[in-house]
Amino acid sequence: MRQFMVILIACGFILSCSTRSVRQEFSGSRELYVGWLDLRAADFRKYGYPTREEWERDIADVNQGLQKFVRDYMKGFAVTGASKIGERPPAYGCAIYFSNAAIDPQTSIVADISIRDMGTGRVVTKFSAYGTSFHMSYSMYSFAGKLNNACYALAYEIYTQMTESGNGEPSRDAGSEGYAGTVNQPVIKATGERSTKMKEVRPGVFVWE
């Protein structure tokens, strides 16, 4: 049953992606830089890592996965990404910035995201996104795997923000089933406080209020 659900979700994403076009605000450049998602290396003990170095390696792997997922969704864009925290983006194209990233008890990720036109310095769009992790397959057994799945959801939300549906409006279907979505402010604040912007309808599945 779980495999069947995964197939349905994947098919839905493929059909959704096939009907989107890049929003006019992002059509001037086909260079896209994915900034570093800072999951705070100093918190290694909080997540059960014996050393900071091991958590840093997994943070790097999660960032590489996020960049790959954005690249997979943003066909036609030359997608590059940060190799370490604090790395500066190029002075051209668009850059995706992440801030206030937090991991919630369901091993999902919430982050404030902004996309900037590096040629003008203008922030084209900004939003907060919540990417949930599917607890199946590889993600059932690996903490980093669950975060990797959450990054897949974040990449999809970035895709929906940079594209539009046939009616000219950005897609809002990403949050409809609690998989990924946007809110007016982070769902889980950096302090761990849960926002009132969403509610849990069943274990690990959230919908927006």
Image (tube, grey):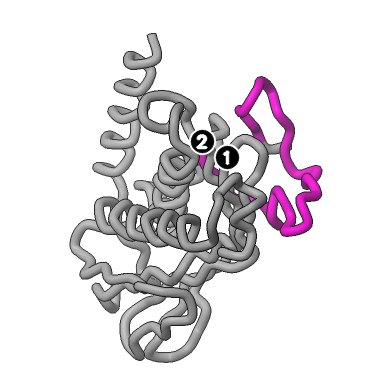
**Residue at image location 64% in from the left, 52% down from the top:** 45
> Can residue 151 be seen?
yes
Say which mark, if any, is on residue 186: none
Find the residue positioned furthest to the front: 50
| Span of residues in magenta | 179-207
Find the residue positioned furthest to the top: 1
Say which mark, if any, is on residue 107: 1
**Residue at image location 73% in from the left, 33% down from the top:** 199
Badge 1 local density, few (<14 within 10 Å), some, or many (20+)? many
Residue 180 part of the magenta-drawn span: yes
Badge 2 local density, few (<14 within 10 Å), some, or many (20+)? many
Q: Which residue is mark 2?
A: 179
Mark 2 or mark 1, whichever is nearer to me? 1
Contact, CB < 8 Å: mark 2 with mark 1?
no
Q: Please provide percent x and percent y for residue 8.
A: 33, 21
Name the side, left or right, on which 179 lies relative to 77.
Answer: right
Corner quadrant of residue 168: bottom left
Q: Amino acid at mark 1?
A: Thr
Tag 2 secondary structure:
loop
Q: Nearer the viewer, residue 64 or 26?
A: 64
* Earlier residue among tags 2 and 1: 1
For the N terminus, the quadrant is: top left
Q: Amino acid at mark 2?
A: Tyr
Q: Please provide percent x and percent y for residue 15.
A: 28, 34
**Residue at image location 53% in from the left, 38% down from the top:** 132
For the C terminus, the quadrant is: top right
Residue 49 part of the magenta-drawn span: no
In three-dimensional space, the C-alpha distance between marks 2 and 1, rounded to whole angstroms, equals: 13 Å
